[in-house]
Image (tube, rainbow, N blue to C red):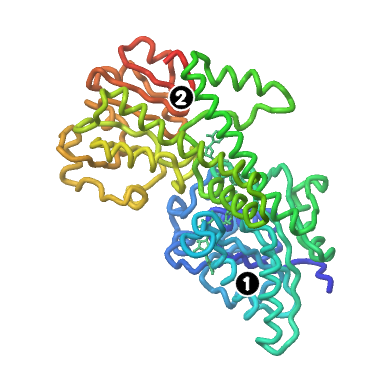
Amino acid sequence: MIIQKIKNICCIGAGYVGGPTMSVIANKCPDININVVDIDQEKINLWNSEDLKMLPVFEPGLADIVKKCRGKNLTFSTKLKEHISNADMVFISVNTPTKTKGIGAGQASDLKYVEACARQVAIYAKGYTIVVEKSTLPVRTAETIKTILESSNSLKKKSNTFAVLSNPEFLAEGTAIKDLEFPDRVLIGGESEDAIKSLSTIYKRWVPEKKILHTNIWSSELAKLTANAFLAQRISSINSIGALCEATGADVREVARAIGTDTRIGSKFLDSGPGFGGSCFKKDILNLVYLSRYYGLKEVADFWEGVVHLNNWNQQRISEIVVKKLFGTLTNKKICILGFAFKANTNDTRESAAIKICLDLLNEGANLFIHDPKVTKKQIAIDLNKAPKNDKEENKLNSKIDESSWQKINNIEDGFKDADAVIVLTEWEEYSKIDWEFVANIMRHPAWIFDSRSIVDYKSIKNTDLHLWKVGDGSN
Ligand code: NAD
Ligand code: UGA
């Protein structure tokens, strides 16, 4: 069966991938109707909100595209049945978290959401439908999806046909729109030449043909996990060297520059930091670990598991350094946290190093004043599993209380006043412009600045009596 031209797309999952990806396709292909569906009514309401600042995903450039396409060829709704049955092509873009119970708990991917989607498509699809795996999935998941889809004929006693493709997404949060508009490559794995052609035709509208790679379906699924594993491995590598720099007097930025100029190594992804966060690196590596063990490859599993171990250790070591420098106790100390998102230019906090570090500091008795330009107080409360100080107390920004507490601040100066330490955890640009000479006058001394991202303006600190700790800097 050949589909010459795709007219209707349904994307299941209106999250960080489904929302931006479909917005960009809608913008590039005004003749294709794109309907993004989700089971989460609250999220759909936010995607439809008049005030574009309320969109559930913050990404530079996203709001402009949503404004341009929404209501024209781009919709957001909970109408799964209607939009699946009208679609020539269905993208599955739902979350694939790590299993929390049963076989493979803590490592294997939980495919319950993907399976639920396949069942919905099996029930509601009409005629010939191309089903595209956009979610990151373990190798051979397409087999499961196919089996479920093929059961649809017996379910409905009529003859529907399906092709399943793997088309993993490589966008990074914070640069999602740029990554989607100018991807390094688009990967399409599958068996059906016609289906591959239909999907390639969409991307060819804005992606040069030589960047559209075709592989078999299993290579495509595995390439996605491998790409994330390699990227995360680079971060654990540079963080391990950062710790060694601190111990030996070397500077990790100089080491990174020296090795990055070797074209075989390359200069990207060599920023030492508090440890990688984000919803995918850890879960995808653990999935790779699980798959390797499943196929009896213990040494392969151990190798990749080391990347996650190193990352956990790195996050923990930052809070230990803070406690040590502040005389071994944080009780009743005011600490200003700059940044809660897992990286700059996103409101996403999933697996953010800030969560683990803030929990460790709270456990030590600290009073945290947390600033982030995009993360809400509600999200921080969910992540820390602890309510903020109540609003009345919040107004008395300088008050000291006996037990650990946190509060969200909108004005960073409120965090600096009488603080014992400032910890930079996310590389938001505004933190690189802080005037430390001013800050030094309002902190409580001895006062510490912990820069886990190497972004603060060191020249402005040099003229003050602030103590500075900078990740990977052996001269600290
Ligand atoms: P997300 O949690 O932001 O969004 C997933 C959405 O799917 C949620 O809104 C959820 O309500 C919805 N959903 C779940 N089950 C559903 C169902 N049966 N019907 C309808 N909607 C359903 O997740 P995400 O960050 O967008 O990630 C999605 C997938 O893409 C994951 O596999 C992830 O590994 C992969 N990925 C993510 C990124 C990223 O930067 N976040 C990048 C590349 C790939
Ligand atoms: C990552 C990949 O970069 C994407 O290609 C992939 O599609 C995506 O995961 C996914 O599958 O979810 P993302 O997690 O959004 O994207 O962001 P990254 O830029 O990769 O950053 C991940 C973490 O590593 C962040 O906490 C970041 O601060 C940290 N990082 C990154 C460093 O500590 N140092 C670096 O040099 C780069």
Using the rendered image of the protein, determine whether residue 95 is visible from the camera's viewpoint. no
Is disc 1 surrounded by few (<14), some (14 to 19) or many (20+) residues within 10 Å? Answer: many
Is the residue 63 above or below the residue 47 in the image?
above
Residue 425 is situated, as x and y percent measured from the top left of the image, at 42, 33
Residue bearing the label numbered 2: 471
Q: Is residue 145 left or right of residue 77?
A: right
Is the residue 334 above or below the residue 312 in the image?
above
Q: Is residue 17 left or right of residue 25?
A: left
Residue type, label 1: Ala
Residue 23 is situated, as x and y percent measured from the top left of the image, at 60, 55
Residue 281 is situated, as x and y percent measured from the top left of the image, at 56, 45
Closer to us: 296 or 332: 296
Q: Is residue 96 left or right of residue 162?
A: left
Residue bearing the label numbered 1: 118
Classify mark 2: helix, strand or loop. Answer: loop
Q: Work out which quarter of the rendered image holds the C terminus and state it.
A: top left
Closer to us: 32 or 136: 136
Residue at 73% across, 50% down: 186
Residue 383 is situated, as x and y percent measured from the top left of the image, at 37, 49
Using the rendered image of the protein, determine whether residue 109 is visible from the camera's viewpoint. yes
Is the residue 476 above or below the residue 105 in the image?
above
Q: Is mark 1 within 8 Å of ligand 1?
A: no
Marks 2 and 1 sit apart, C-alpha to C-alpha, by 46 Å
Q: Quadrant of residue 315?
A: top left
Q: Work out which quarter of the rendered image holds the N terminus and state it.
A: bottom right
Is disc 2 surrounded by few (<14), some (14 to 19) or many (20+) residues within 10 Å? Answer: many
Q: Earlier in the sequence, mark 2 or mark 1?
A: 1
Residue at 59% across, 54% down: 290
Residue type, label 2: Val
